[in-house]
Image (cartoon, rainbow, N blue to C red):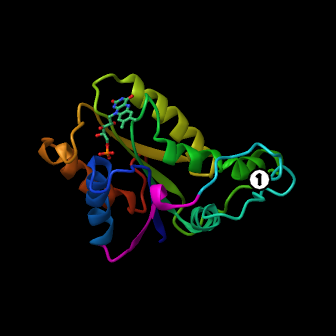
Amino acid sequence: MKVIALLGSPRENGNTELLLREVIRGVEESGLKVKVFRLNKMNIMPCQNCGGCEETGCCIYEDDMVQIYDAIRRAERIILASPIFFFGLSAQAKIMVDRCQAFWCEKYLLKKTIPEGQHGRRGLLLLVGGMRKEIGVQCAEATAKAFFRTISVPEHKTLAYMGVDAKGAILKHPSALQEAYKAGQQLINLISDKE
Ligand SMILES: Cc1cc2nc3c(=O)[nH]c(=O)nc-3n(C[C@H](O)[C@H](O)[C@H](O)COP(=O)(O)O)c2cc1C
């Protein structure tokens, strides 16, 4: 089973990354490996809405997004991890999501979906915000849901932690790390939480 993580935080060893690490620990204790894409370090141009993907479902720009397109196509478990910035996903995450317009064209214009794979496709969304206002989670969740459905991930679970602001503050959260670890273990279960 191929598992990938798309990390949208620019802060190294920040709260989102620490949370993601626990998810990865939960996944990798099974012997599987998680391929992490650190979006902040990648050269990904924002979508230009050039229409270049409309007839083919393929983006015409060949930057680091090429690796992510390929990984998304092959993955059966996809983790999107982002801090909340201005009530939504981080720019790093959103730029990657927008470039998935190519998958949108493939799915909705060309009527093709990414094959399910042997184990089906499932997602996990990790969000960390410094404020307590839920609107940040709602906005980020709406974008992430559109992302997951576009890339033919029919269901995803969300873990969101608010009021976590200073670097490393997530380490003091009473339950976040344990919940993330458990979510990692559950993500690779063959039976979905909803069944
Ligand atoms: C540019 C910027 C915008 C932010 N906007 C919000 C926000 O709208 N809502 C919120 O809850 N926290 C906001 N925060 C706080 C971060 O979500 C918080 O510090 C989080 O723990 C960062 O996670 P990280 O350590 O993984 O980068 C913002 C932080 C930055 C730098």
Report x, y in % for residue 8: 44, 50
Question: Callout 1, which amino acid?
Answer: Glu
Q: Residue at x 35, y 24 (%)?
A: 134
Q: Residue at x 32, y 49 (%)?
A: 16
Q: Residue at x 42, y 58 (%)?
A: 191
Disc 1 secondary structure class: helix
Report x, y in % for residue 162: 27, 32
> Left of 3 or right of it: where is 103?
right
Q: Ligand 1 quadrant?
A: top left
Report x, y in % for residue 86: 43, 29
Q: Quadrant of residue 67?
A: bottom right
Residue interval drawn in magenta: 30-43
Q: Is residue 35 above or below residue 129?
A: below
Q: Is residue 88 above or below residue 144?
A: above
The foreground one among 17 and 126 is: 17
Q: Residue at x 77, y 45 (%)?
A: 108
Can residue 195 be found in the magenta stretch?
Answer: no
> Left of 85 or right of it: where is 179?
left
Report x, y in % for residue 139: 48, 29
Can residue 38 be found in the magenta stretch?
Answer: yes
Q: Residue furthest right?
A: 55
> Left of 130 or right of it: where is 187?
right
- Residue holding disc 1: 106
Q: Is residue 50 above or below residue 132?
A: below
